Image (cartoon, rainbow, N blue to C red):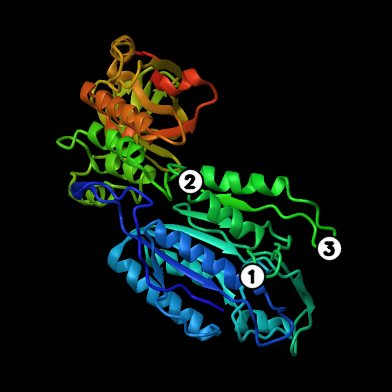
């Protein structure tokens, strides 16, 4: 087995200016090619895969861990390597990549990585001898200050089949592949689907997965989702393997983060456009959280985290759920009791907003300002409609067109219950679309729309060239109504 050595980054990527330097990059690169027990066959190319990944990632600015080879990693040693890496990431933050090449199996609801000294004779050995991936989940939770990429080329065993119990118990089946449910803020990729066997490749070369991955991450200004899509596409054209069956790499990026292995000045300028669009005198924590969702390990990530922690919180409006009285002579009471003081009486159609609700009573604020309790069965959600507007931009402009003011003036600020903003982006330059989103958010807030009812802005892939210059704004508007006493 080989483990990465000291890092020596070169000019293969753009690190950014002094006042906006790219976030630190670290990688834990592990590979196990031989095992002490014959039940786990030798994987000659795990060594060469690790060497290849280490070399490429160093040139892309990643500091490689652990710092020195210590021979084949036993279960205890592998855990200690992981624990030491956690300490490092908690100190520096930034971007963290964990790569493992070797054997992996799935059993029950968990996936397992196989250390050098693993033994698997009985079913209980899986839990006691292998490394459960929930340990990796715990490690990721400990490193919450970083953006995480986890890549497991660990499906190279056809499975252990049925393992008998030791003492009482039932026969358990361990299959190929790794089963892992990462947190939403983690980009996760595997070399094969569950129950598939990943190819090790021609002896002395690289596995098909490691070869494709190491090639695509070196391409300039390629979003991480695009990189993994390119890797998957390579396997469509692989010749069939009758012995091992199909191999389909997987990836997930539920948080929608933008990460570029080889950023350029274009990457920097695109992110800077989003950053410059933020009004730092009025922006609340959610604005910076949204920025970090898009660029969690970019050039302005450290400053965004600092501003997120310093920005004043936006008060949540408890009156966002609008209601309407459904009957006549409905009494607004001071307490949750049929015998409590009657503050006012309302007829069918009177409007208000829900503050609190229990099984039988609802605390409401009526549109005339009165606050009190009504029976829950005498109110209903107020009727509403969606008002949708597509804003069209020209060139690099990011200030909202005048159409937005027209929509807000027409529907009335007080009638808006919810606002949703969607922009369409080019995967190689999402910053321009993100800048338009944040300026639409600021325009809504400036007009008096409660920031608590503005849905977290989203970026979606453009299906037509025209959509690259469009932002969709959808307002949920409560139909007008008057208080009837």
Q: Position of residue 78 (x, y in %)?
A: 50, 80
Q: Position of residue 305 (x, y in %)?
A: 25, 51
Query: For this view, does 6 lie left or right of residue 99?
Result: left
Location of mark 3 (residue) = 243
Q: Secondary structure at mark 1?
A: helix
State the quadrant of the N terminus.
bottom right
State the quadrant of the C terminus.
top left
Residue, x 40% and y 28% (percent of image)? 420
Q: Position of residue 91 (x, y in %)?
A: 28, 68
Q: Are marks 2 and 3 in contact (CB under 8 Å)?
A: no
User: How many numbered markers are drawn?
Assistant: 3
Which dot, 3 or 1, sits closer to the camera? 1
Residue nearest the observer in this picture, 373 or 429? 429
Q: Secondary structure at mark 2?
A: loop
Q: Position of residue 182 (x, y in %)?
A: 52, 58
Work out whether 132 lies above or below 344. below
Query: For this view, does 187 lie left or right of residue 276?
Result: right
The Cα atoms of the two marked residues, 2 and 1, are separated by 24 Å
Location of mark 2 (residue) = 219
Location of mark 1 (residue) = 45
- Mark identifier at residue 295: none
The Cα atoms of the two marked residues, 2 and 3, are separated by 33 Å
Q: Earlier in the sequence, mark 2 or mark 1?
A: 1
Q: Secondary structure at mark 3?
A: loop
Work out whether 57 lies above or below 429. below
Q: Earlier in the sequence, mark 2 or mark 3?
A: 2
């Amino acid at each position: 087995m080989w483990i990465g050595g000291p890092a020596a980054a070169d000019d293969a990527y753009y690190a950014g200016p002094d006042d906006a330097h790219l976030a630190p990059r670290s990688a834990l690169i592990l590979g196990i090619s031989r095992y002490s027990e014959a039940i786990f066959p030798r994987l000659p190319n795990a060594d060469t895969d690790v060497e290849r990944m280490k070399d490429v990632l160093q040139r892309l600015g990643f500091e490689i861990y652990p710092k020195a080879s210590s021979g084949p990693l036993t279960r205890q040693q592998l855990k200690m390597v992981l624990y030491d890496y956690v300490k490092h990431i908690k100190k520096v933050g930034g971007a963290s990549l964990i790569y493992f090449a070797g054997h992996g199996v799935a059993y029950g609801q968990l996936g397992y990585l196989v250390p050098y000294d693993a033994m698997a004779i009985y079913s209980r050995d899986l839990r006691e001898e292998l490394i459960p991936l929930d340990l990796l989940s715990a490690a990721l939770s400990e490193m919450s200050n970083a953006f995480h990429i986890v890549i497991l080329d660990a499906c190279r065993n056809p499975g252990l089949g049925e393992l008998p119990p030791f003492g009482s118990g039932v026969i358990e089946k361990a299959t190929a592949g790794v089963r892992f449910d990462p947190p939403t803020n983690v980009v996760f990729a595997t070399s094969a689907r569950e129950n598939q066997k990943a190819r090790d490749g021609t002896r002395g070369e690289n596995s098909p997965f490691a070869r494709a991955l190491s090639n695509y991450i070196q391409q300039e200004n390629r979003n991480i989702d695009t990189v993994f899509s390119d890797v998957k596409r390579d396997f469509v054209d692989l010749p069939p393997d009758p012995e091992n069956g199909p191999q389909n790499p997987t990836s997930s990026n539920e948080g929608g983060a933008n990460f570029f292995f080889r950023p350029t000045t274009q990457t920097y300028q695109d992110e800077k456009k989003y950053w410059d669009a933020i009004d730092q005198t009025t922006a609340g924590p959610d604005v910076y959280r949204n920025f970090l969702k898009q660029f969690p390990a970019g050039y302005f990530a450290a400053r965004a985290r600092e501003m997120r922690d310093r920005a004043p919180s936006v008060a949540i409006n408890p009156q966002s759920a609008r209601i309407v009285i459904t009957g006549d002579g409905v009494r607004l009471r001071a307490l949750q009791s049929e015998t409590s003081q009657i503050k006012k009486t309302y007829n069918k159609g009177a409007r208000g907003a829900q503050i609190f609700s229990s099984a039988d009573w609802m605390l409401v604020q009526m549109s005339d300002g009165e606050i009190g309790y009504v029976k829950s069965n005498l109110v209903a959600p107020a009727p509403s409609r969606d008002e949708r507007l597509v804003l069209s931009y020209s060139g690099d402009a990011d200030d909202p067109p005048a159409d937005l003011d027209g929509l807000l003036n027409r529907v009335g600020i007080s009638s808006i219950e919810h606002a949703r903003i969607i922009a369409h982006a080019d995967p190689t330059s999402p910053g321009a679309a993100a800048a338009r989103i944040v300026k639409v958010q600021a325009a809504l807030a400036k007009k008096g729309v409660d920031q608590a009812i503005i849905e977290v802005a989203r970026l979606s892939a453009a299906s037509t060239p025209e959509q690259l210059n469009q932002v969709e704004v959808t307002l949920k508007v409560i139909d007008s109504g008057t208080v009837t006493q």
